[in-house]
Image: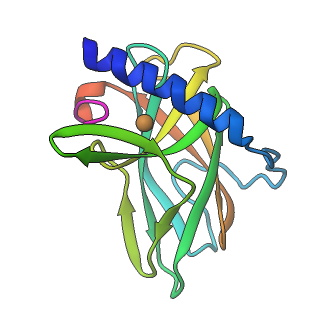
Amino acid sequence: MTSRTTIRSLTVILGVVVLAIGIAGCGADRRAPAGGNSEAASTIRIVNAVVPEPPTDPASAYMTIKNSGDEPDRLLRVQSDAAKTTELHQTRMNGAAMSMVRIDAIEVPARSDLAMQPGGYHLMLIDLTHPLRIGGQVTLTLTFERAGVISVVAPVVTASSIGTMHR
Ligand SMILES: [Cu+2]
């Protein structure tokens, strides 16, 4: 599909931009327990984390971030064992055309849920370290401004179960 090719080249361009900006600070040392879906004693909880099986590199990841606290929080960065680079992305409408852009952070308002889903926020896993197949798992380590580091394990699921990628 040509749209996929477009996405691919866009991703390459974005990757170059990221390299140019230079993301430092990729050394999350504090490892939160990766227990399926959530993190105890935190105002931030991650549920429904999934990675639709990608036809090729890159892959995307979706989840819902639940903030039970009285303060907003911000997802600042994500690392994964499955990809050399993980970016925060947002799909936007540009007139009739859809495109995705890399964003610096995802704001999670107080006492609310933020759903990452096709057509909106998502994570982009670029330069996969191994092929992602249905039934596999991806560990995602998320760094929040207030809640700190939270790890989740996202199963690789059929792409159709979450809708078309990047739409
Ligand atoms: Cu993307």
**Residue nearest the observer in this picture, 10 or 25:** 10
Residue nearer the viewer, 138 or 21: 21
Specify the quadrant that holds the C terminus. top left
Residue at point 54% right, 84% down? 71
* Residue 164 highlighted magenta (yes or no): yes
Tell me the residue at 38%/75% (across/down): 112
The answer to whether residue 137 is seen in the rendering is no
The residue located at (32%, 18%) in the rendering is 4
For the stretch drawn in magenta, the main secondary structure is loop
Q: Is residue 32 left or right of residue 9?
A: right
Residue 29, position as x, y percentages in the image:
84, 51
Front in this rendered view, residue 75 or 156: 75
Q: Is residue 128 visible?
A: yes
Task: Give the quarter of the figure containing the N terminus.
Answer: top left
Q: Position of residue 108 (x, y in %)?
A: 46, 70
Q: Residue at x 52, y 27 (%)?
A: 13
Residue closest to the far left: 96
Residue 97 location (% of width, % of height): 21, 37
Q: Which range of residues does the magenta coloring cover? A: 163-167
- Which corner quadrant of the figure contains ligand 1? top left
Relative horizontal placement of residue 44, taking residue 56 as reference (left or right): right
Q: Closer to the camera, 57 or 44? A: 57
Determine which quarter of the picture holds residue 134. top left
Q: How is the image coloured?
A: rainbow
Q: Give yes or no for residue 160 being in the magenta stretch.
A: no
